[in-house]
Structures are given as C-alpha cells and as structure tokens.
Amino acid sequence: MNAMKNKVQLIGHVGQEPEIKTFGEGKKVANLTIATNDIYKNEKGEKVEQTEWHKVTAWGKTAEIIEKYVTKGKEIAIEGKLTHRSYDDKDGNKRYVTEVVANDILLLGK
C-alpha cells in the first residue's frame, strides 16, 4: 500500500480580496478564504445548503498567480496540505488556526 499523504483539494469561491505580502528578498505569500457549499436533504426532505469557509495560504509562484488573477468571488480549485498552528494574540491568549497551504491553483469560471 502506498504511504498515506496529507492532501487537500477544494473547489470554491474566494470570499474576499486576497491579502498579499512581500518579504525583503521578494518572496510572496497570499492569504485568502474559500467558501465551499454542500447541498443535501434533511430528515424532513427539505433542501439544505451548508457553506464552509477555509483559510488558504500560498507561497512563491502560487502566491504570484493569486496576486495577478484571483479576486473576490472568483471560482478556483486549489490543492495543498492541511496544517495546524498556534499563536498568542495581542492579549496573550493562545489561538489555534487550521489552514490549507496551497501548492497548486486552477482558475475556473470566466
């Protein structure tokens, strides 16, 4: 059996304009959110739509593509890995973040 890998694939719409940062040596990082929708019928037979929001981070060339072509509302597909990290906020409280680190992007729609 092949080794299991940490791999995530999402297709969704960008929730807000991507945030792009450039570091001293010119390396870029893009932060954005993607909304995915799931439609199902509940126990009463009613159609229910559920939206999930995903934090996405991309580095290097992928971030440059996002900077150039991705805007709020754009439908995109991303592939990457799921990561977890923590940090201390300004009040000293520990915060936890789960995000997808994208290594590939596909622009969909118009």
Image: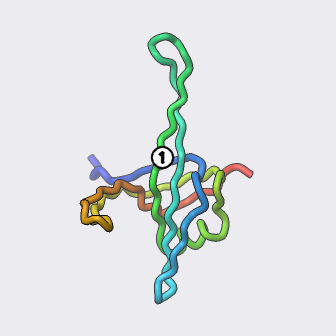
Extreme-bottom residue of the structure: 25
Viewer-closest of 97 and 107: 97
- Residue found at x 67% / y 65%: 69
- Determine the secondary structure under disc 1: strand
Residue 5 left/right relative to 12: left
Residue 26 percent across, percent down from the top left: 51, 85
Q: Amino acid at mark 1?
A: Trp
- Residue found at x 29% / y 58%: 95
Above or below: residue 108 compared with residue 51: below
Viewer-closest of 92 and 78: 92
Neighbourhood count class around disc 1 (C-alpha, 10 Å): few under 14, some 14–19, many 20 upward: some
Viewer-closest of 83 and 81: 83
- Residue found at x 34% / y 56%: 97
Viewer-closest of 108 and 4: 108
Extreme-right residue of the structure: 110
Residue 40 percent across, percent down from the top left: 51, 24
Above or below: residue 61 compared with residue 55: below
